[in-house]
Image (cartoon, helix red, strand yellow):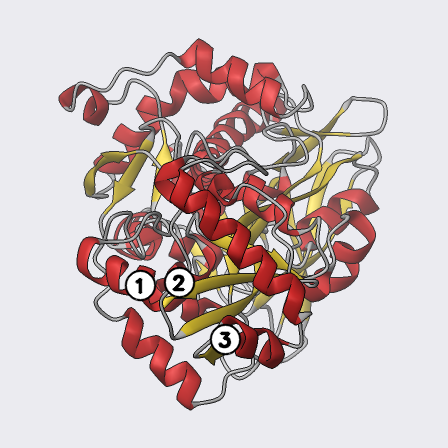
Amino acid sequence: MSITEQSAYDLVVVGTGAAGSAAALEAAQKGLKVLLLEKGRSTGGSSNYTEGLFAIDSYLQKEQGIKVSGTEVLKEEVEYSKYKADSRIWRKYIDTSAETVKWLEDQGVEYEGVQAMGDGEATWHIYKGMGDAVIHKALQPKSESLGVEVHTSTSAIEIKQDSNHAVSGIVIRNEATDEEQVVDTQAIVLATGGYLNNPEMMKNLTQYDTSRLVPVSSGKGTGDGLNMGWNIGAKHYGTGMAMLFGGYLRDPNEPPFKFIASQMNTAAGQQPLLWVNETGERFVDESVVYNFSYAGNAMYTQNKVYSILDQGVLDKMAADGNFMGLGVYVKRGQKMDKMQAEIDQAVADNKAFIFKADTITELAEKMNLPVETLTNTVKTYNSYAENGTDQDFGKDSEYLVPVNQGPYYAFELQTGAFCTMGGLQVNTKNEVLDDAGQKIDGLYAAGNDASGLAGDTYGPNMPGTCVGYAFYSGRNSSDNAAEYIKSTVKI
């Protein structure tokens, strides 16, 4: 008994997130016979939680009068990566990004509009219904209508090659029965979403203290595609980066994704207010939160990080809105009408991440921090707020809000992370390269499995670049796979 309906396919796509779903549909629209594999029970992966994609010169930006220079974006992103990003890949990605937005609309994707994030450019094309709607109401139904064969609970475990080292097949496994099958194919697109959820790979390939990292994702990014590629000689390239997004609460009794839409979480981890470390000292200009990747980096300079909020600033955010949101889950400037109830419930439930006290002295004692240090930190910070000048780190006076109205709250923050990027070096055709820089015939990598877009820190000034690249690179992989397959047909 076989797992698949047929024994051979033109193209096998591994992973059903933005990259894999786009690759499968693009290939089907080009007339290829496609097998789409998902190791989990449901499709979409972490792409289900995405909010929108990057683009330059889209029809939506033109309608809103938004002008962003593609060349300036390229220069900024490559410089931001310390030139670890591939300028050629960025050029092609930027030049086709508007067409990607339109292609998605043509498949049935609806948009809310274009916006910026933090201090970044307005490149973020927000789609209605999150990525879940993009995949399950548009891309996957259309793919299936064109004959794409989709299998869930089915893993890819090994790539087969012929005597010329070209892709010739793939070994797949039914996760429910452990049955294995070799499927013949001329081309494979690896779109398995990186390795954020593989603790061993994170420990070995990154510098992060994984005990303080909170993966907020589908949980399925375990490096499967990377390992398959490396096992047949693909170059190990561009690992080490996770997309951090600053402070995040951890509750061992709740799944991490539960807090992503929590106003308490946004108040605790995403505001440019007062942070202290494990000794009660302030250590950074907290407005770093406007660049969420930098915020994550800053947190890792300390052994522990706490945010300190007083009742005054909580009341202000409830009445007037927050300073900084968390994507479209909690929007910037949104009135925090549920925040106090969420905080009160966390205190009542004695959650390990929250501390409440009537005085700073009592708060320090509950946090097990040096009382004198924390009280002096708050006293100094309040003097800066009164004078309107941060003499330590130069934070803008707009964010120097005094901490002087009890009760007082402290939140222990971990560092949130959404995905990794990189692992397989690709060229502008998304062909996977070996150690000699030569393409492995028939093998492509898309989305977070592919290197070339970032250095050691994700660039949030152009929001939506990660998922936008996933859609683009998935399609680009299939376009080039179709050309490759056509070139190998014997007349």
Q: Is residue 297 visible?
A: yes
Residue type at mark 2: give it: Asn
Name the spot of residue 214 as percent of width and height, x first: 59, 63
- Left or right of 246 in this view: 180: right
Could you tell me residue 111's position as x and y percent? 20, 41
Q: How many marks?
A: 3
Residue 471 at x, y percent in the picture: 43, 37
State the residue lying farthest toward the bottom: 349
Q: In the rendered structure, which disc, 2 or 1, sits on the residue that comes first in sequence?
A: 1
Say which element carries label 3. loop
SS label for mark 2:
loop
Q: Which residue is tagged 3? A: 255
Cβ atoms under marks 2 and 1 closer than 8 Å: yes
Pointer 1 residue? 312
Q: Amino acid at mark 3?
A: Pro
Q: Nearer the viewer, residue 377 or 307?
A: 377
Instruction: Say which of 114 and 92 sits in front.
Output: 114
Looking at the rendered structure, which numbered label has been put on residue 404?
2
| Marks 3 and 2, how far apart at CA | 34 Å
Q: What residue appears at the point 66 percent right and 59 percent down from the top-left corner?
A: 222
Observer-side mark, 3 or 1, equals: 1
Sort mark 1 into few (<14), some (14-19) or many (20+) by Cα contacts within 10 Å: some
User: Do the residues under discs 3 and 1 have CB atoms within 8 angstroms?
Assistant: no
Q: Secondary structure at mark 1?
A: helix
